Image (spheres, rainbow, N blue to C red):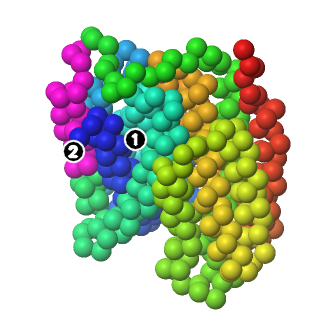
């Protein structure tokens, strides 16, 4: 088994175990902490996102001095210990402190993303990013599903013990990688393929790409928070199972897009693919706002294809603008703006639905994607031919 395969498998395990409890925090807070207000749970989840966003740049800077896999051995040991401790905590303030400290250490696994990319030739970046995107997306869905299954046969607090076991398994995988794949401490990290040096790294270009990411993640995901409710209001097949299937439909399309990308002999220009994906995404979002279930289904399929293409190519563009020794730090910058976009989309969707109805996020999302397509060539310019 190659180093790359081991790292992708470890990423999948991290995503699955970390998502076991996330959909069920309202139930957990109600059962363990005597039913605090709903806005308390929302505030906690927002702070979790802020912690991950704030701490990852520090992990990235540490990774410039210490090999990422060696960092994960200690970080996952701490994460697993703190996660197990959450199982025993009955005090809400103490849970906040311990669980947020747990999140600090759990967030270190994001280092695997830029590290895997540093092992690849630039020609392979798009396919590798596509694989990681599918792993993360379906890992989150599978984690939520497994979390629900675990809650049917175990107490809700027992999920933290399962999560802790996942952290310790990741630690064991890292220890195996250190013995079998990595150089001794103090030596330069070995890679399976010599990465292509990119001497054209430009900080202003990376920050402009961050602005594109912020706008795209806001308008691209503004329809997500209330989609299931919208579907159940307008569709004839309005069961929760049907709503969940339609909600997850873009993820299934992403797998198809990954398979198609592996078969394609030519990937095409990264920037042209982003523009085409943004325009397709705008059209797909627009038709979903008409309240017809068949248009929604068509829109979900087209939106899944567009979302996959844009997300993968934007990430590929980051690694095109960056250089291997700066991958982790630059990825941390992008991650901050992605998180801000996701947080803004959730808050914005709530405002739009409460004031203008369930269809308004689709109109705003479509216009926003068109705006992103218009601004993208201005913010991220093509390099000058030499």
Q: Residue 112, labelled with which disc?
A: none
- Residue 200 position within the rendered picture, expressed as x and y whole percent measured from the top left: 63, 16
- Magenta span dominant secondary structure: helix
Pointer 2: what residue? 169
Q: Residue at x 27, y 25 (%)?
A: 70
Outermost top residue: 186
Q: Nearer the viewer, residue 368 or 36?
A: 368
Magenta residue span = 164-185
Residue 165 sits inside the magenta stretch:
yes
Give left or right: position of 80 versus 106: left
Give left or right: position of 304 versus 68: right
The C terminus sits in image quarter: top right
Number of marks in picture: 2
Q: Residue at x 78, y 75 (%)?
A: 290
- Residue 132 position within the rendered picture, expressed as x and y whole percent measured from the top left: 45, 45
Give left or right: position of 225 versus 113: right
Q: Residue at x 18, y 29 (%)?
A: 180
Q: Is residue 25 above or below residue 273?
A: below
Pointer 1: what residue? 103
Quick one: SS at disc 2?
Answer: helix
> Nearer the viewer's eye, disc 1 or disc 2?
2
Q: Nearer the viewer, residue 152 or 287?
A: 287
Q: Indicate the quadrant where residue 364 lies.
A: bottom right
Give left or right: position of 86 versus 232: left
The N terminus sits in image quarter: top left
Decide: few, some or many residues near mark 1? Use Cα within 10 Å; few <14, some 14-19, many ≥20. some
């Amino acid at each position: 088994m190659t180093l790359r395969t081991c790292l992708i498998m470890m990423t999948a395990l991290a995503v699955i175990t970390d998502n076991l409890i996330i959909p069920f925090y309202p139930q957990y807070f109600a059962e363990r902490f005597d039913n605090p207000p709903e806005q308390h749970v929302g505030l906690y989840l927002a702070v979790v996102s802020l912690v991950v966003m704030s701490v990852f740049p520090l992990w990235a800077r540490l990774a410039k001095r210490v090999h990422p896999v060696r960092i994960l051995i200690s970080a996952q040991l701490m994460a697993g210990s703190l996660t197990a401790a959450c199982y025993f905590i009955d005090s809400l303030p103490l849970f906040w402190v311990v669980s947020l400290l747990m999140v600090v250490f759990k967030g270190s696994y994001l280092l695997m993303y830029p590290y895997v990319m540093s092992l690849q030739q630039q020609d392979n970046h798009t396919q590798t990013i596509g694989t990681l995107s599918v792993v993360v997306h379906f890992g989150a869905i599978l984690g939520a599903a497994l979390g629900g299954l675990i809650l049917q046969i175990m107490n809700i607090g027992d999920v933290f013990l399962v999560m802790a076991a996942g952290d310790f398994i990741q630690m064991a995988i890292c220890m195996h990688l250190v013995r079998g794949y990595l150089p001794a401490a103090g030596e330069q990290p070995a890679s399976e393929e010599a990465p292509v040096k990119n001497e054209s790294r430009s900080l202003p270009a990376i920050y402009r790409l961050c602005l594109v990411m912020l706008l795209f993640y806001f308008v691209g995901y503004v329809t997500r928070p209330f989609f299931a409710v919208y579907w159940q209001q307008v569709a004839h097949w309005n069961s929760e199972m049907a709503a969940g299937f339609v909600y997850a439909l873009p993820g299934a399309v992403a797998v198809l897009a990954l398979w198609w990308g592996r078969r394609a002999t030519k990937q095409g220009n990264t920037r042209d693919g982003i523009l085409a994906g943004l325009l397709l995404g705008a059209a797909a979002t627009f038709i979903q706002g008409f309240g017809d279930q068949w248009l929604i289904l068509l829109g979900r399929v087209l939106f899944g294809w567009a979302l996959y293409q844009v997300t993968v190519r934007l990430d590929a563009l980051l690694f095109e603008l960056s250089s291997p020794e700066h991958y982790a730090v630059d990825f941390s910058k992008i991650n901050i703006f992605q998180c801000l976009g996701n947080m803004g989309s959730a808050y914005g969707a709530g405002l739009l639905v409460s004031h203008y109805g369930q269809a308004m996020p689709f109109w705003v999302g479509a216009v926003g994607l068109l705006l992103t397509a218009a601004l993208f060539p201005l913010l991220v310019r093509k390099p000058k031919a030499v």
